[in-house]
Image (cartoon, rainbow, N blue to C red):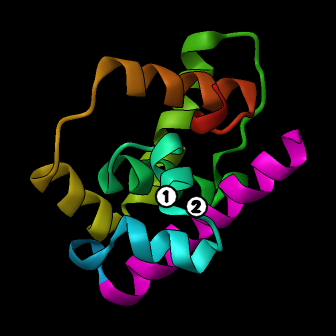
Amino acid sequence: MANRRADRTEAILQSTLELAGESGFAKLGIEAVAARAGVGKHTVYRRRPSRGMLFLDAVPSSNKQGLDHRDTGDAVADLREVMTRAADLLGRVPWGPLYFRLLVTQQPLTHDHIDRVLRAVFTGMRPSET
């Protein structure tokens, strides 16, 4: 069952990135993501309550290798390296401009979401699995 859930999550994140790349964030819809991923829209909403949160989780998943880091034993240095790599990823086309537009126009990030993303970066899990 865990593999099925992970497969669905992967399909949802991939569909989100594809649709955002094709038509932009403004036209990104949960129903379209669900249809492309082959799941019901409630499956998408259970993982992320809004298209903004869905997109925020999907972007880092597009380049896991670019966010890989070594564990040096120094948490501050490791965090600095990960944040530098994330900033580089989000500064590049095609996701950087879409991500920036989302941050400027959508709901603010909550501390809970930021915590989940950071935990995911350091544990190797997706934010949706934490």
Classify residue 26 by image quadrant.
Answer: bottom left
Q: Amino acid at mark 2?
A: Leu
Residue drawn at x 64%, y 46% is: 67
Q: Is residue 90 left or right of residue 42?
A: left
Q: Amino acid at mark 1?
A: Val
Q: Nearer the viewer, residue 124 or 44?
A: 44
Seen in the picture, residue 69 relative to 90 is either above or below; the reply is above
Task: Check residue 4 for magenta coloring.
Answer: yes
Q: Which residue is mark 1?
A: 59
Label 1: few (<14), some (14–19) or many (≥20) C-alpha neighbours in 10 Å: many
Seen in the picture, residue 50 relative to 32 is either above or below; the reply is above
Residue drawn at x 72%, y 43% is: 68
In the image, which disc is placed on residue 13?
A: 2
Label 2: few (<14), some (14–19) or many (≥20) C-alpha neighbours in 10 Å: many
**Residue 54: x and y, percent?**
43, 52
Q: Is residue 95 left or right of residue 12?
A: left
Q: Are marks 1 and 2 in contact (CB under 8 Å)?
A: no
Residue drawn at x 34%, y 56% is: 51
- Main structural element of the magenta stretch: helix, strand or loop? helix
**Residue 98: x and y, percent?**
29, 68
* Residue that sits furthest to the bottom in the current view: 22
Please provide the residue range marked out in magenta. Answer: 1-23
Mark closer to the observer (1, 2): 2
